[in-house]
Amino acid sequence: MDSVITLAGVGLTYPGPPPVSALRDVDLDVRQGDYLAVVGPSGSGKSTFLNVVGLLDRPTHGTYLLDGVDVSTLSERDRTALRGQRIGFVFQAFHLMPYRTATENVALATLYAGVPKKVRISTAHEALARVGLAHRAHALTNMLSGGERQRVAIARAILHRPSLLLCDEPTGNLDSDNAASVLTLLDQLHRDGMTLMVITHDSTVASRAKRLVTIRDGALC
Amino acid sequence: MLIAPSRFRLGDVIEESVAGLLQRPMRSALTMLGTMLGVGSFVAVLGLTATAGGQIDKRFTELAATEVTVADVGVAGANDPTMSFPANAASRVESINGVVHGGRWWPVPLDHPAVSSAPGISSHGGELQILAMDPSTVEAARPVLRLGRTFDTFHADRHEKVAVLGSVAASNLGIYRLDGNPAVFIDGTPFTVIGIIDDTGRMPDMLFGVIIPASTAYDLYGPPTEQRAQMLLETRLGAASVVADQVSLALRPDAPDLFKVTAAPDPKALRSKIGGDLDVLFLTLASISLIIGAIGIANTTLVAVLERTHEIGLRRALGARPRHIAAQFLTESTVLGLLGGMIGAAAGITVVVIAALVQGWTPLLQTWAVAPAPVAGALIGLLAGVYPAQRAARIEPVEALRR
Ligand SMILES: Nc1ncnc2c1ncn2[C@@H]1O[C@H](COP(=O)(O)OP(=O)(O)OP(=O)(O)O)[C@@H](O)[C@H]1O
Ligand SMILES: [Mg+2]
């Protein structure tokens, strides 16, 4: 029972017109502590795959178990709640709120879980320390460098101890030095037992993972 | 398995909304302007109306409520040339309990009299009226003297040729000083000017007049013809209607029907007539600026929703439900309206107080006009936020997070 996600025959067809089968018959089992990279050329279906795994989109075929819960049959309300509680997102574009401090941004992760503000702030400080940014806790995010921003985003993604950390091109907007520091951080999270899935087309990023799957025309291989 | 649904605590909603507004402080301030103006004008107009109304009330209780007029209607139907008032009409009415002053007056029946400040000079008297008055009539009109004095019973009993000038008449005639005993010449007859009236509480026509004692006028020019004589009475407060009932009999026990007596008009009726037109105009303007304020808030909130699509997508990814997104933007617009309403109300109150101080009036503000102002602002913000909030709630996270 240590599977974090189990996909069986999962597919997604965009209705179109014309209808596009962006994902077909995907079977995948990700276990606790796995570090998985998903690679593939442009248009192969990486983003579609991320949206399905991250509960942002609903597959049209197959079953998807997250922590043993069949999410393909969940109501919209439960899917939203589960997404907030079990998935941590790291985006290429960081998606931090400008004019607000690093702490405030990180503390947003458990806002919709109804965690009291004090608790959110203190756990946010811990998470920032974990990504090596304790000294920048009160800085406004628009004053941070790209690498610092992505580390703040990672702190936000791990604040609520998600079952799966989903990273979409996490180094896509960074220079090589900053990219390296972010990848080192991901390695460290993996060592601490975090389950990681990184979607990328960058082979140096993919090489850090312990497992590699390739997606081509919507199919895993 | 039971999944705890997402929530958004009220305190958090308010905090997130205020933080959203503070991201763009200048824009938020400008957005509030319309609501501020609208609510502010409402409070100011209602306050100024109340303040001015209170002032009018005061004057009425002091002046109009203590006024009784008596018209000489004569014998009905006939072209009655005689004056119905007896010569001692003034002392007759003043013996009524409650009368302070009272006397007769009429325009002197002269056809285009030549009035000038020196003999031989052609008339200045185009707009000047020559008024015959008992000394007590002048008193009842509450004159404010600029120079000299008014005539009294001594002058009247001796039928002296004296005159008191209204301020307008005095400047038309070029009489500004009393040293040197200036005179006005009415068709060549000199009248010594003994006083100049600056202002009156009643009968403002007196300011355009040359006022001479009624006894003198009767002697020289006979009884009034075209416009018949009247009496003006000042009573003690609250005595006007009682006095009005007794005047006719006191004047002519033999023929009380010769007079028509009028007591003070109802002050309330008059006040609403004065206030009404202006109120409607300004309240219409205030409503228009409230509508503009609402459109401003709706527009700014919509722009904020479109600008912050990524933020909305992120919040949805972090577990926010569409209703949580809607609540946040609705709260932002409501807070904008509330702040606009509060600042507007404060500005409106300031305007009323300053205006009242400048006029030397007592500022009057009804609680019902001020207390709901912030609530009204908040309501406007809430309504204005409905459409943008709906738009925000409909944003799909997948679309919003696409880079
Ligand atoms: N909303 C949509 N409606 C219809 N077709 C879509 C939609 N979104 C994506 N597609 C199509 O589905 C296929 C997979 O798209 P997807 O965005 O998952 O590719 P990707 O691997 O993320 O590409 P890239 O590396 O360029 O981001 C593409 O052919 C794309 O055109
Ligand atoms: Mg993509």
Image: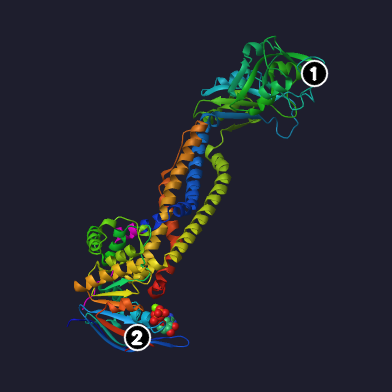
Q: Position of residue B207 (x, y in %)?
A: 66, 25
Q: Which mark is residue A215?
A: 2
Q: Is B9 part of what is drawn in magenta?
A: yes
Q: Position of residue B197 (x, y in %)?
A: 63, 21
Residue A220 in view:
yes
Q: Position of residue B353 (x, y in %)?
A: 46, 37
Nearer to us of marks 2 and 1 is 2
Q: Chain of mark 1?
A: B
Q: Is residue B361 above or below residue B151?
A: below
Q: Is residue B93 above or below residue A205?
A: above
Q: Nearer the viewer, residue B59 or B39?
A: B39
Q: Residues within 10 Å of mark 2 (few under 14, many from 20)?
A: some
Q: CA distance from mark 2 to mark 1?
A: 119 Å
Mark 1: amino acid: Asp
Q: Is B332 on the left-hand or right-hand side of B202?
A: left
Q: How many marks?
A: 2
Q: Which residues are magenta?
A: B1-16
Outermost left residue: A1
Residue at 35% of width from left, 86% of height from top?
A215
Q: Chain of mark 2?
A: A
Picture quadrant where residue B313 is located: bottom left
Q: Is B101 part of what is drawn in magenta?
A: no
Q: Nearer the viewer, residue A97 or B37?
A: A97
Q: Is residue B140 above or below residue B373?
A: above
- The residue at which mark 1 appears reads as B187
